[in-house]
Amino acid sequence: MPTTTTPSTSTDRIEKQVTYDVPRSRVWRALTDVAQFNKWFGVTLTSPFATGAEVSGKFSHPKYERFTMTIWIETMEPLEEVAGGTRLTIVESGFDAIPESRRAKAFSMNSNGWNTQIENIRKFLAA
């Protein structure tokens, strides 16, 4: 599956794009069905995803299981069909609200984390 990521140039926002060579409906289910999302992302969320929802759960990886992840879903937009598959755009924002002394590290760690998750979903979709 070809993967292309585009790092953001903003200090407040990470934005990456990736193209997977699978149908849009398959990628959409992997992103929006909580059970499928849990498998590739490595969390144990129980609430369904919906625009405006706040969803929390523990990480399932032993190294991180003491941490809780909380996400606030602002929008859920249709995926883009492109030549060769489906384009997924990942956006995470809010880094300017982190104290300046921790902001660069948080941005770097999360950007690298999204690179890992891009690979995790690729493997999940290929299975």
Image (cartoon, rainbow, N blue to C red):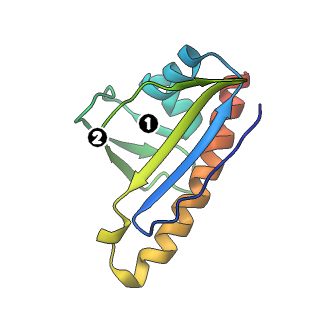
Q: Quadrant of residue 39?
A: top right
Closer to the camera in the image, 43 or 96 = 96
Q: x, y percentage for residue 3?
A: 72, 40
Lateral position of residue 1 relative to residue 88, left or right? right
Residue at 71% x, 32% y: name it.
123
Furthest residue in direction front, as rendered:
83
Q: Earlier in the sequence, mark 1 or mark 2?
A: 1
Q: Quadrant of the N terminus?
A: top right
User: On the image, numbered disc 2 is attached to which residue?
Assistant: 74
Closer to the camera in the image, 50 or 91 = 91
Q: Are marks 1 and 2 in contact (CB under 8 Å)?
A: no
Residue at 70% x, 44% y: name it.
4
Q: x, y percentage for residue 114?
A: 57, 51
Q: Residues within 10 Å of mark 2 (few under 14, many from 20)?
A: few
> On screen, 73 above or below 115?
above
Q: Quadrant of residue 67?
A: bottom left
Residue at 29% x, 69% y: name it.
97
Furthest residue in direction bottom, as rendered:
101
Q: Give the spatial CA distance, label 1 vs label 2.
A: 20 Å
Q: Amino acid at mark 2?
A: Glu
Q: Mark number for residue 44?
A: 1
Q: x, y percentage for residue 30?
A: 53, 24
Q: Amino acid at mark 1?
A: Thr
Q: x, y percentage for residue 25?
A: 54, 14
Furthest residue in direction right, as rendered:
1
SS for callout 1: strand
